[in-house]
Image (tube, coloured by chain):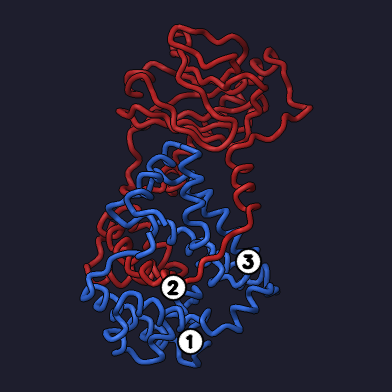
Amino acid sequence: MNSLLPGRLDRLAREYALGTLGGLSRRRFERQLRESSDAMAAVGTWQERLAALAGSVPPMRPSELVWSALERRLFVASTRSPSAPNRPQQWLRAFLSGRALGGALAGVLLFTVLLRLQPGLVGMAPVTGALPASYVGLLTDDLGRPALLASSRRHGRTLTVKLLQPLVIPPGRVAQLWALPKDDGAAFPVGAVPGAGSATVALADTSEKLFFNVSRIAVSFEAAPAKPGDKPSGAFVLSGHCVKLW
Amino acid sequence: MLTNEHLTRLLSRVAMHDRAAFEQVYRATCAHLLGIAFRILNNRERAEEVLQEAFMNVWHGAGGFNASVAGPMTWLINIVRNRAIDALRLAKSGRAATVVLDEEALAVAANEAGQPEALLDQSLARLKIVGCMGELGASQRQALALAYYRGMAHSEIAEALGAPLGTAKAWVRRGLDRLKTCLEAAGVRGNPLA
């Protein structure tokens, strides 16, 4: 990237923080922000100065409907569709078809491109433009639709999960994420995932140690979160390839 | 109002998807943040929509909050202001050209204390930098107030104040320069509310 001279950086940072930097200049500066900690610090300093002006704004108590809408959107999964198929054999055949495989790989590529263009989608912390070494999985449903994104930094001990569409978890069951080794070894449990929104799953070890030999990850419904040594009790409702990026 | 330290701790718990912490952050800050969105949008319904979208960002993006870059209240204000300004620009671009002012918006328009200049004056008094900022001309203060409290672009400020675009830009720039000098002289950093 082209680094900015301090004076120009400060001018851009203050206009950006104020909201008066528009159009192409704003987009160009946002790229700088993702790549430069100096630019981010300059914007933060100006945001602090301007926030000092907010103290005089009279508060307004929002309607309680705002909070209830937030709860509904973030924490409540939608009701189960009556047409939702429950035919694991048919789903498995569809998943193993070339079309579904191609779709899943295309999805992983799309996710990679998205990460490069919009790192804020995942962490909102665009400290660097370089894509970190990570394991990434895109799980699809029985119709081949992208349903769940999972990613973990190579040496991280957490896995970030984002539901791309609500997963209807039957009452009394949990959605359990499994890792499937490439040599047809036994699936091992990774953690439970929510029906909607995002979650951070604590890993038993670094993702490098857990996933280096894993080719697929999948979700099944279980009566309780699986423990080490447990096996999936039924068919997978979501599944996809696990790839490493570096 | 929570302290910065308490709010920072709560946001770190929100990053781990702690719902109770999320609700605490919302309850403690929503009224202040809605006020900021409302000054920009002049419409309670749209301001509440912006507040809701902003807190969706907070839930999903709390892991990106970095207390060494900006304070927690500043981070929250920034999310709400950006959302509100985006919504304002979208509305002005024509998709929602007809903006119906609700009763509170009309009250704000009629209430001098709700005007951007009055808000700026009150803030400067709270920050004890009235004298220092007094070196600015009236137009420079107005331009800064319209940009911050109303989320106006340079072209809108120029139109509102009847000045050429280049002059409006210079007024805003001068206002920001003076604000920086005065805040640094007064040793003020960040939003005093949190």
Label 3 sits on residue: B44
Nearest to the eye among marks 3 and 1: give it: 3
Residue A170, visible in the rendered structure: yes
Q: CA distance from mark 2 to mark 3?
A: 18 Å
Q: Nearer the viewer, residue B1 or A244?
A: B1
The image quadrant of residue A25 is bottom left
**Residue type marked 2:** Ser
Quarter of image, res B11: top left
Colour in which chain B is drawn: blue
Amino acid type, callout 3: Arg
Within 10 Å of disc 1 (Cα), the crowding (few <14, some 14-19, many 20+) is some
Residue B120 x/y as whole percent: 41, 79
Tell us which disc is closer to us: 2 or 3.
2
> Residue A203 bears which disc, if any?
none
Q: Which residue is mark 2?
A: A56
Residue at (67%, 67%) from the top-left corner?
B95
- The quarter of the rendered structure image containing the C terminus of chain A is top left
**Horizontal and vertical percent position of residue A106:** 53, 34
Q: Which mark is residue B158?
A: 1
Furthest-right residue in this view: A82
Which chain did the renderer colour red?
A
